[in-house]
Amino acid sequence: MSCISSAQAKSGIENYNLLSRQEEYVWMPVLHYQTRSGVYAELRYNYEDINTVSLFGGKTINGGKAVQFSITPMVGFSAGTFTGVSVGLNGEAEWKDFYLSAQSQYSVGTKQHVADFFFNWSEAGYAISGNFFGGVAFQYTRQTGVSDAQPGFVAGFTAGNFSLPVYLFSPFKQGRSFIVGLNYDFDFKRKR
């Protein structure tokens, strides 16, 4: 994770795969792009719900010295199984080899049969070495008055611009699930 301010545009491809005994395999790709001035866009599929495409936009604010942070308020629209609008906030912070990240959103369905929901995905971790990291993760969803809290663990490997995070949620319950990611981040260098 890096929330250091950059004078370059940057982009990334995140590829998450949900593996669970209770549910079918779910592929969740996420594309994101941030301009040099911090304008942020994100395109997601199967993230808000199965067979749903979502487009989010916002502005990233970076700051800090000893503790570096990044905050991105966003608005979005989804179409598909879940059709609606969302407001969200992505946040990251780093201090030495420690990191925190959180993604929260509130989504309002625009179809009668589609329920509104609140979702949060948070992580706290430590870079064990230049290539390995680990920590705790937490997913929380509240929809139609029902809360679903899923604590878990994350461990991962980085090599250059690639990262391979592996999440285990609800590890001590029968309904445990794995999420495996393969992510790639890159900068667009300025032409001279």
Image (cartoon, rainbow, N blue to C red):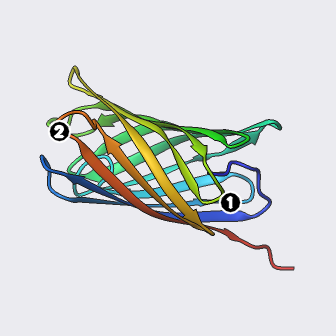
In this view, the residue in front, 12 or 1, is: 1
The disc at residue 35 is 1
Percent position (x, y) of residue 151? 35, 32
Q: Nearer the viewer, mark 2 or mark 1?
A: 2
Percent position (x, y) of residue 29? 38, 62
Which residue is disc 2 drawn over? 175
Secondary structure under tag 1 reads: loop
Q: Quadrant of residue 18?
A: bottom left
Percent position (x, y) of residue 119? 37, 34
Q: Quadrant of residue 53?
A: bottom left
Is 77 located above or below residue 33 in the figure? above
N-term mark: 2 or 1: 1
Q: Quadrant of residue 60?
A: top right
Please give the name of the residue rendered at 40% of the width and 40% of the height, measured from the top-left corner.
Answer: 153
Please give the name of the residue rendered at 56% of the width and 55% of the height, measured from the top-left corner.
Answer: 132
What is the crowding at mark 1: few (fewer than 14 residues within 10 Å), some, or many (at least 20)?
Answer: some
Instruction: Indicate left or right for 57 with 52 as reference.
Output: right
Going by the numbered disc 1, the residue's amino acid type is Thr
Instruction: Indicate left or right for 91 with 181 as reference.
Output: right
Instruction: Indicate left or right for 94 with 15 as reference.
Output: right
Secondary structure under tag 2 reads: loop
Q: CA distance from mark 2 to mark 1?
A: 40 Å
Q: Given the current orientation, which residue lies at the most extreme right position?
A: 192
- Judge whether residue 92 can be spotted in this image: no
Which quadrant of the rendered structure holds the C terminus?
bottom right
Please give the name of the residue rendered at 22% of the width and 41% of the height, measured from the top-left corner.
Answer: 176
